[in-house]
Amino acid sequence: MLIYVFVGTTYKGAIDDVDMILQILENCGYSNDRFYIHCDAALYGLIVPFINHAKIITFKKSIGSISVSGHKFLGCSMLCGVQITRKTYIATISKRVEYIASIDNTISGSRNGLAPIFLWYSLSMKGHVGLQQHAKMCYENARYLKDRLHKAGISAMLNELSNIVVFERPCDDKFIRRWQLSCTRDTAHVVVMPGTTKEIIDNFFKDLMQEREKWCGITLAPCLADDIGSQNCLCSYHNMHH
């Protein structure tokens, strides 16, 4: 059985509980050789390890592999990433190639030699302390944005350990394009990255509030309970019941 675990979903930043999944498998009588768990930590792989109360994802647990992007949180200037797996799984795809007098253990038969240099450079420049500072800043600034939205009466949610704030979709497409917001249905989201300072958040919030004064006279705030949970929805109905 193949199990795909999200360490941060793309839109809302939700994190699957690996420990709970492993416990369920054990309770159902599945031995380790009957399942394979891949952890997709494209963005959060370099954030979660630096948050104190986060659960650690480690190969001491029965996972098969984990993938982390280099061009997201780390900020490499080209698309790249790393997949880490166990040697036993690498051995199944490894084969000796005569004309290069070497063993090929890549999936495609080739790989970009420049990408590891970008990864090494970025990791070396930031270091453990730098990564920790960036992770903490993203974590705190995301909560800062969510709190500002809530205090202004705007529906917003922030998953635990997440740096992605989901909130009420702005009514103006020009505003969405100006701030390059990603939207789905009645929601939009902001991914708070190392370059997203409180000054940028304050400018975004100020612009949003100025534009929202125009929209509120035209349309009521939508109910987002189905998208972000009733506890995060501040529409007229749920705001009255909070």
Image (tube, grey):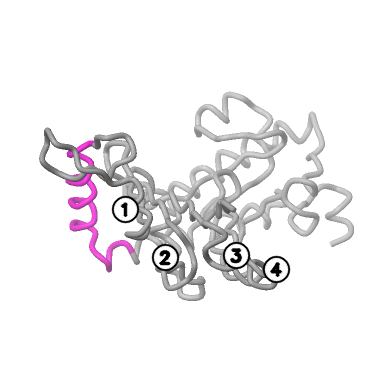
Magenta span of residues: 112-131
Q: Horizontal placement of 17 versus 137: left or right?
A: right
75 or 49: nearer the viewer: 49
User: Which residue matches tag 3?
Assistant: 17
Q: Say which residue label 2 marks.
A: 136
Residue at (51% x, 71% y) in the render: 55
Disc 3: CA contacts within 10 A as few (<14), some (14-19) or many (>=20)? few
Which of pointers 2 and 3 indicates the residue nearer the eye?
3
Q: Main secondary structure of the magenta part?
A: helix
Instruction: Provide residue 101's location: percent of width, then percent of height.
Output: 10, 40
What number is the disc on residue 213? none
The structure residue drawn at horizontal position 34% and vertical position 39%, both measured from the top left corner, is: 107
Three-letter code for the amino acid on which mark 4 is drawn: Cys
Q: Report how far apart the C-alphas of labels 3 and 1 lie in the structure.
A: 29 Å
Residue kind at label 3, given as amino acid type: Asp
Q: Earlier in the sequence, mark 4 or mark 2?
A: 4
Q: Taking 60 as reference, is 82 above or below it? A: above
Question: What element does badge 1 sit on?
Answer: helix
Of the two numbered discs 4 and 2 in the rendering, the one whose residue sits closer to the viewer: 4
Whether pointer 1 and pointer 2 mark residues with C-beta atoms closer than 8 Å, the reply is: no
Q: Which of the two labelled residues, at mark 4 and mark 3, occupies the earlier sequence position?
A: 3
User: Which residue matches tag 1?
Assistant: 91
- Is residue 122 inside the magenta stretch? yes
Three-letter residue code for mark 2: Lys
